[in-house]
Image (cartoon, rainbow, N blue to C red):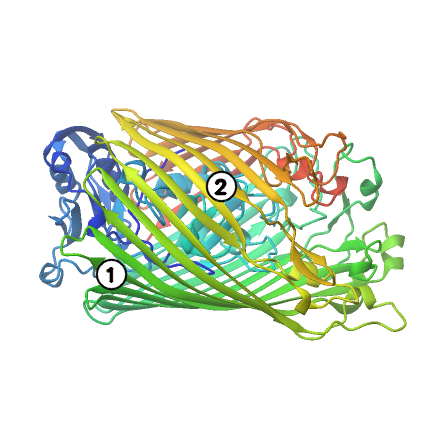
Amino acid sequence: MQHLHLPRLKLSRIAFAVAIACTQSGAWAQAAETTAATSAVQLNIPAGPLSTTLTRIGQLSGRTIIADPALISGRQAPAINGRISSGEAVRQALAGSDLTTETTPGGALSIRRKSASEISDANTSENATVMPTVVVTDERMSGGSLAQPARQITVIEGQELNDLRAISPNSIGSMLTKAVPGLSDSSRSLTDYGQTLRGRNALILVDGIPLNTNRDSSRNLVNIDPARINRIEVLRGSSSIYGSGASGGIISVTTRPPGGEPVAETTISMNGSLSRLSKDGLGAQVQHYFSGKGDVVDYEVDASYRRIGGSYDAHGDRIAPDASQGDLFDSNTYSLGGKLGFRIDANQRLQLSASYLRAKQKTDYATDPKIASTPIGTATARAIQGLNLANQNEVENTLLSANYEHKDILGSSLTALLYGRDNFTRFTPFDARANVNRGNNIDQVMQNNKVFGGRLTMDTPLGSDQKAKLLWGADFIQERSNMPLDVFDPAAYDASGGLVFRKTGQRTYMPWLTTRSIGAFAQLQYKFNEQWSAEGGLRYEKASASFNDFQPLSQSKLATPATIKGGKVSYDAVVHNAGVTFKPVKGQEFYASVSQGFDLPDIGVILRNANASFNINSSQLEPVKTDSYELGWRGRFSNTVATFALFRSSSDLGAVQSFNNGLVLARTSEKINGVEATVDYYSDNEKWVSGGTFTWMQGRELPQGAKQDQQMTGYRIPPVKVTAYVQYQPNERWSNRAQFTWFASKDYRLADGKTQFARADVDGYYTVDLVSRYKLNKNDAVTLGIENLFNKYYLPLYSQLMRSGNNNSRLPATGATFAISYTHRW
């Protein structure tokens, strides 16, 4: 795994909904390492993208290099060879371009244009974007992270992002599994369910906007088109100042920025199964984007169409649909996005962004319902042909946002973000005739989410020496969600063997539920000297949930159905964090941190199953706090970079449950311990790069009323995970990467040895992937990716744990698949 690029990030937000919209570095965080600036270092960096070259110079020299991503995007750098200083190496990389460097007061190298306007205002970037400034250096040396120095962060971008995307073109979850320590395996379907980060929930952001909702449908990553991604940052571990949903960490996705040199690029790709070559298993994608800038305006537009075909296991058998959470086999996805920026003056900038994605399935296959009655754990789901269902799995997501920046308000910088989101998801049909809370129907659930939020962040330097700064601000979010469901004729379903769904009506599963949250935060950061730095912060959060009168489905077939009276419940919390970092010598860094994360209670999951006597006013709720502790190290030895982290998290409250006709939080105590390690090695000639990651976790829980603790389920705590990669680039045109991913076996059953939902004796499995890229010329390239190269037959963790509680969710993984693409830059 490569961790090639860590911005020394400035925390620019934080919401119930959090966001990381600005990753600019402050002078307090840029160590003035005179030795790094003047000492010569042996460099053998081949010609390639300027961003990659600057990254390697920063890694090998220890020098901090600052550059606007839009400024260096799409540029090439010549080969850098010899024993030279970092400053000279950067100057060689910029030779022949309109870029130059200057040294900041902290000793970092700042890259800027040679234009007169930029020279007159060296601290202003002409092409500021949502992420206006990025520090190109090695993340493990920097001590920076999304929130504080005492954290581990994984950054995926550039060639590594392209390689992972070539291997898994239709699944962001699978891409992340192969690259991020502490992250569980993906479901291989529509859902994020079970893909935890350090055993807890991860907050998903796209361009700083949260995708998680309080009534969590676990369909977050599927709302992002993989082809639009420019960068992924994963903060591993909780942080109190980010708001709800980040108890396990944050996955922040950044789409392509506007600005930079005018560029237009088209990619045409095709993918399919190698275990069974057929037209039914073929998929394809066409994607085009262009970006550029004028004197005042910059822009970016991205459009794509993707067709996903059927999937086949290693035996060549068609994989059945996911009967629990749904999938996108035989589907079409349309995606359109754009950004428009206005430079008001040297200090002010406004950016407007919009994106739309729709994925809709139209398949002829269903899951054989007879498999559900077979002894649990003894069979796999089976696909049957002839499905008659008008509306199948679907995801629709619209995002609008406005971002305003002012770099100097009485010495402080300000960022403000407003955003709106309209999201719709349709699940797979389900035979719920045995479930009275769903009205004893064969049904299909939908969910609507309408979200509006914003944040205001001030970044205030303290003291003339700029060794301290205060980051403070406020944020809010309002979410309205409901869950209607379609009801189908049970006679038609039974007569067809589970193939015909004839709609007979629509009911309300969950009424419109409105949740509101407002938070205030302050984070103080201080650098004592070149060796020691620390920070600490507080956040206050107040939230409420309300709904109107409604009739639950449990009453729908009674002669005198009861109506649940509407109401409102409120709760609040204060959480804190603190961290310290120590750099005894250049290239070695130790840190320790204590932090609280929290999750707001998912009220909707109980509200939809309410009985006749339910009364929201009898509820006693509060955010579910998680206390996290971490010790870690980051180090560099010659051409090797490594990290190590020990972490522990604990919580006393569990899920929402009904009690005394109201809502309370179950007193389920949880303790999670874990170890993460990463290593990357770069050969002297830069032709060979290799590395890997290791993750081990143990989770114990004490359910309410129990006297003996037990291990947590496999949907929370994954088995031991090991990843490894080898990259070989024999010349400037040709590059290759082999990727290995392994999950160990683990028995999640309790003392009774019973196999059930989330508890099974899980078999271990591994995959090997391969990607090869060849540049035909400066404008054209072809890429070939193969996933599951050796065509291994296995069931992923998600499937072995049986999400549906029966064999209909025991789904094999795909066998060997290929993805080939052609890219042309106009």
Q: Position of residue 6 (x, y in %)?
A: 31, 43
Work out whether residue 304 or residue 343 is closer to the camera in this orientation and state it: 343
Q: Position of residue 751 (x, y in %)?
A: 73, 29
Residue 460: assigned label: 1
- Whether residue 643 sits left or right of residue 751 in the image: it is left
Work out whether residue 399 or residue 22 is closer to the camera in this orientation and state it: 22
Determine crowd level at label 1: few under 14, some 14-19, many 20+ residues with C-alpha closer than 10 A: many
The residue mark sitting in front, 1 or 2, is: 1
Determine crowd level at label 2: few under 14, some 14-19, many 20+ residues with C-alpha closer than 10 A: many
Q: Secondary structure at mark 2?
A: helix
Q: Amino acid at mark 1?
A: Thr
Label 1, label 2: how many angstroms apart (C-alpha)? Answer: 37 Å
Q: Is residue 325 above or below residue 680?
A: below
Q: Position of residue 316 (x, y in %)?
A: 68, 33
Q: Is residue 692 above or below residue 422?
A: above
Asked if residue 818 can be seen in this view, the reply is: yes
Which residue is under mark 2? 175
Residue at 19% x, 34% y is 61
Residue 737: assigned label: none
Sequence-first disc among 1 and 2: 2
Work out whether residue 463 or residue 768 is closer to the camera in this orientation and state it: 463
Q: Where is residue 490, by image quadrant?
A: bottom right
